[in-house]
Image: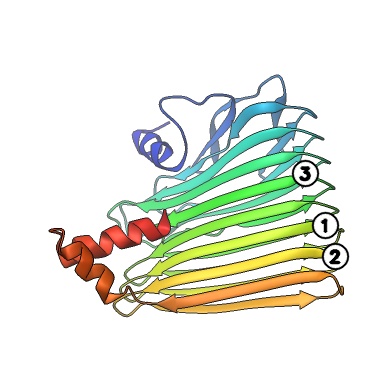
Amino acid sequence: MNEITKDLLREISEWDGGFKGAYNIRENGQCAGRVSSENIKIENKKDAPGLAIFINPGTKGETVSIPACVTQGGVDDLVYNDFFVGENADVIIVAGCGIHTETGEPARHNGIHRFFLGKGSKVKYLEKHVGKGHGTGLRFIDPVTEVEMEADSQLEMDTAQIGGVDRTTRVTKAKLAENAKLLIRERILTEKDQTAKTEFEVEMNGNGSGVDLISRSVARDNSHQAYHSVIIGNAPCTGHSECDAIISENGKVDAAPELHARDNDAALIHEAAIGKIAGEQILKLRTLGMTEEEAEATIIDGFLS
């Protein structure tokens, strides 16, 4: 691994010179390191660039990390990763992407992840995206996540993109069986002329299934964000979508949540709020000795935490 990759790994994952548990490090489209464990096997896909990760039934307390780094302009990295989570497993999956450019050439990472959660399994999925470097080339990160959840499975997704990514389209689709539960927390910050588009689509097909979708975003300068969520209740289920956004300077945010109840016992709710930082919040922090810029940064950090 080069030094830029090491710096990116510190930001997007729990790398401190190494990983605990199974891992695969992707650097500029190539494998820079891989370790499987007794219960988690990582293999190359046979039909496309990427990985097949097999987590044994009953696996508890283990972590698998699959960070991807692009450290130079002119790289267009596409990867397909499939996760097969065995029944009653309870694991953490850490995935993230960092892009660093110092030239005028664009760089892109497109990670397509598919999750197949067995009955009674639990997964906590952590994903962080960052863009770094002084190059003028655009930094693209376009993640696609597809989820199939069997009965009684649980998936908690915590995703963050806090600065440095010029263009991103984020697509997440999920299908839930009986009593499956999906929790998604998304945080996005855009600045300058950056754009971010988010698409969620969740189908609840089993009795007692549920989704809780929470998005927090900040659009600064001349950046633009578009948020679109679709929750479909095909059975007795619960669904909640919440989109809160802060705009400052000339930032723009579009929010379009959709609910489709196709069962009499589908209980679906959506909330959306877009606005600027309240003046009294700034004033209160300024009375504590902060400048206006420091006060705004503190409010934004708290909102996105």
**What is the spatial separation of the Cα atoms under label 3 and label 2, in whole angstroms?**
21 Å
The picture places residue 228, in percent across and down from the top left corner, at 60, 74
Q: Amino acid at mark 1?
A: Gly
For image coordinates 53% across by 64% down, the residue present is 215
Q: Which residue is mark 3?
A: 117
Please say if the residues under marks 2 and 1 sit with CB atoms less than 8 Å apart. Answer: yes
Residue lying at the far top of the rendered structure: 38
Q: 266 or 176, which is in the foreground?
A: 266
Q: Secondary structure at mark 3?
A: strand
Q: Which residue is mark 1?
A: 208
Give neighbour class at mark 3: few <14, some 14-19, many 20+ (Cα, 10 Å).
many
Please say if the residues under marks 3 and 2 sit with CB atoms less than 8 Å apart. Answer: no
For image coordinates 27% across by 54% down, the residue present is 134
Q: 246 or 133, which is in the foreground?
A: 246
Q: Amino acid at mark 3?
A: Leu
Residue 24 position by quadrant:
top right
Q: Earlier in the sequence, mark 2 or mark 1?
A: 1
Q: Which residue is mark 2?
A: 236
In this view, the mark in front (1 or 3) = 1
**What is the spatial separation of the Cα atoms under label 1 and label 3, in whole angstroms?**
17 Å
Give neighbour class at mark 1: few <14, some 14-19, many 20+ (Cα, 10 Å).
many
Q: Quick check: 121 above or below 207?
A: above
Q: Secondary structure at mark 2?
A: loop
For image coordinates 48% across by 59% down, the residue present is 187
The picture places residue 149, in percent across and down from the top left corner, at 79, 50
Give neighbour class at mark 2: few <14, some 14-19, many 20+ (Cα, 10 Å).
many
Residue 40 position by quadrant:
top right
**What is the spatial separation of the Cα atoms under label 2 and label 1, in whole angstroms?**
6 Å
Q: Can the viewer see residue 212?
A: yes
